[in-house]
């Protein structure tokens, strides 16, 4: 790392520590795609909880025993705010971030270790983050790993599509019995007849199969433990709300409708834009826009 860049990184981290101390922040979140010169973060852990969000799984991280809280982000392009959003939702899922926390977020240029930005978030007041925390904490029996697996698949599909072509689909997670009652099969269910172990979203061997089925119209229904109940399911619940954002298509309306009358969470991929939106309680609680820069 060039000396000037290293000095700037140290200044940013020192400033983040000072801000976190004055605000009595619960943690400092560092979003950095490339991990270099990690010793500069030793000062953070002396006073605050340090959370690292990164795409880098290289040797520097493994050799730094003072870094305990690591959130692995998918190897996809996001802008700074998108990376912070994704890190926070993964942090909530992992139990590292809680509703009411104040966080000091440090980020920089994607695909580098350069840090040049500090953002302060209040999880109890920031509207999008607050509703994310509420929704994640209201997922009941749903395994956080199941939610993460579905989200990672959705992000993968949003960036890569299927065979290079954009796709749009819905993953509905949790409250599967009620969701099934309020939906109908559009095709023969491709997951019917298999054991629970053979059709679990946590099985990495199923990723390509799920991607293939994403071309089918309809939604994936996923049980709280990750078992894929069905694919190609038409969601019948209608949303009655004047507050729903205009310009969103039938998939988003279906996701809003089913989550408004069940305890499920729905993850929707927009075929036209590649954006991923997450629904709970009939409303969008997180939107992750696909970056135009790869």
Image (tube, rainbow, N blue to C red):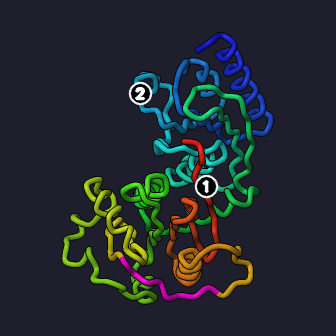
Q: Nearer the viewer, residue 234 or 293?
A: 293
Find residue 192 and report its image quarter. bottom left
Relative to 257, 148 lies left or right = left
Residue at the disc numbered 1? 289
For image coordinates 54% across by 80% down, the residue present is: 254
Relative to 104, 229 lies left or right = left
For image coordinates 46% across by 69% down, the residue present is: 169
Q: Is residue 237 magenta?
A: yes
Give me the C-alpha separation between circle 2 and circle 1. 27 Å
Q: Secondary structure at mark 2?
A: loop
Q: Secondary structure at mark 1?
A: loop
Question: Is residue 47 in sight in this rendering?
Answer: yes
Say whether disc 2 or disc 1 marks the residue closer to the N-terminus.
Answer: 2
Quadrant housing the N terminus: top right
Q: Label 2 neighbourhood size at 10 Å, few (<14), some (14-19), many (20+)?
A: few
Q: Label 1 neighbourhood size at 10 Å, few (<14), some (14-19), many (20+)?
A: some
Q: Nearer the viewer, residue 188 or 198?
A: 188
> Where residue 133 sits: x, y (%)?
62, 59
Say if 90 sits above or below 287 in the image. above
Say if 4 sits above or below 211 in the image. above
Labels 2 and 1 touching (C-beta < 8 A): no
Q: Is residue 45 magenta?
A: no
For image coordinates 48% across by 37% down, the residue present is: 55
Extent of the magenta region: 232-239
For image coordinates 74% across by 56% down, the residue present is: 126
Q: Which mark is residue 58?
A: 2
């Amino acid at each position: 790392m060039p000396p000037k860049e290293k000095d700037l990184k140290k200044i940013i981290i020192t400033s983040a520590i000072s801000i976190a101390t004055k605000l009595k922040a619960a943690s400092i979140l560092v979003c950095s795609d490339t991990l270099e010169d990690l010793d500069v973060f030793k000062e953070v852990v002396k006073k605050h909880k340090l959370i690292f969000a990164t795409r880098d799984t290289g040797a520097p991280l493994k050799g730094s025993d003072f870094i305990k809280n690591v959130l692995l982000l998918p190897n996809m392009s996001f802008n700074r705010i998108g990376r912070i959003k994704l890190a926070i939702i993964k942090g909530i899922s992992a139990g590292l971030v809680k509703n009411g926390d104040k966080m000091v977020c440090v980020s920089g240029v994607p695909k580098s270790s350069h840090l040049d930005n500090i953002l302060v978030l209040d999880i109890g007041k920031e509207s999008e983050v607050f509703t994310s925390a509420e929704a994640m904490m209201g997922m009941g029996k749903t395994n956080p790993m199941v939610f993460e697996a579905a989200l990672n698949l959705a992000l993968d599909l949003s960036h890569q599509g299927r065979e290079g072509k954009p796709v749009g689909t819905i993953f509905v997670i949790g409250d599967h019995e009620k969701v099934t009652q309020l939906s109908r099969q559009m095709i023969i269910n491709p997951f019917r007849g298999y054991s629970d172990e053979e059709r679990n979203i946590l099985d990495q061997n199923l990723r390509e199969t799920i991607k293939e089925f994403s071309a089918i119209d309809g939604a994936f229904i996923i049980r709280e433990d990750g078992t894929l109940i069905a694919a190609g399911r038409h969601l019948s619940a209608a949303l009655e709300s004047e507050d729903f954002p205009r310009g969103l298509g039938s998939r988003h309306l279906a996701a809003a409708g089913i989550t408004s009358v069940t305890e499920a969470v729905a993850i929707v991929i927009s075929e036209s834009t590649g954006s991923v939106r997450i629904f709970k309680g009939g409303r969008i609680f997180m939107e992750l826009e696909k970056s135009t820069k790869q």
